[in-house]
Image (cartoon, rainbow, N blue to C red):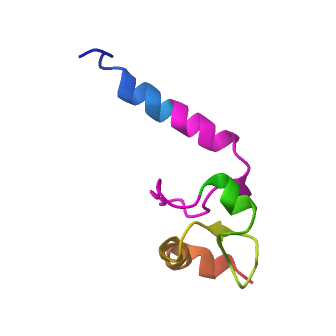
Amino acid sequence: RVWGDELPGQLRAFGAAVADALPVGWACNNAACTNLGKLSELQLVYSRAKLCGGCRQVRMCSAECQKQHWNAGHKLVCK
């Protein structure tokens, strides 16, 4: 191996640190989101995302993420 055995863990730690540093509204609010090929953070900020129609506080990168986030518990806290 060229990079050693530690690289995957280091990359995960780096990704988590970057995600923690972003304001919540700048990323898909679905914690289970794995869409790396859909809307970028910049597009989410400029409202090209799926905005929750109830609370208008959370953004999702896609209709699939919006539905998944709703079923995962957002419906319990949304006004």
Q: How many labels, in total?
A: 0
Q: In what quadrant of the picture does the N terminus appear?
A: top left
Quarter occupied by residue 77: bottom right
Work out whether residue 21 or residue 51 is closer to the camera in this orientation and state it.
51
- Estimate the x, y position of residue 13 in percent, counting from the top left: 50, 31
Residue 10 vs 45, above or below: the answer is above
Choose top left, top right, bottom left or bottom right for residue 16.
Answer: top right
Q: Where is residue 3 drawn, in percent x and y?
A: 33, 16
- Measured along the vertical axis of the image, is residue 14 above or below residue 36? above
Q: Nearer the viewer, residue 33 or 2?
A: 2
Please state which of residues 33 and 35 is positioned toward the viewer in this rendering: 35
Residue 31 in the magenta stretch? The answer is yes
Residue 28: say if magenta.
Answer: yes
Q: Residue at x 47, y 60 (%)?
A: 32
Compared with 27, 19 (above or below) is above
Q: Position of residue 14 (x, y in %)?
A: 53, 31
Is 56 situated left or right of 35 in this image? right
Q: Residue 79 location in percent, x, y? A: 75, 84
Residue 41 against residue 62 in the figure, above or below: above
Farthest residue toward the left?
A: 1
Along the viewing direction, whichever of 69 and 47 lies nearer the viewer: 47
Q: Which residue does the image show at 28% across and 14% down from the upper left?
A: 2
Image position of 79 (left or right of 32):
right
57 lies left or right of 19: right
Residue at figure coordinates x 53%, y 37% from the top left: 15
What span is colored magenta in the figure?
Answer: 14-39
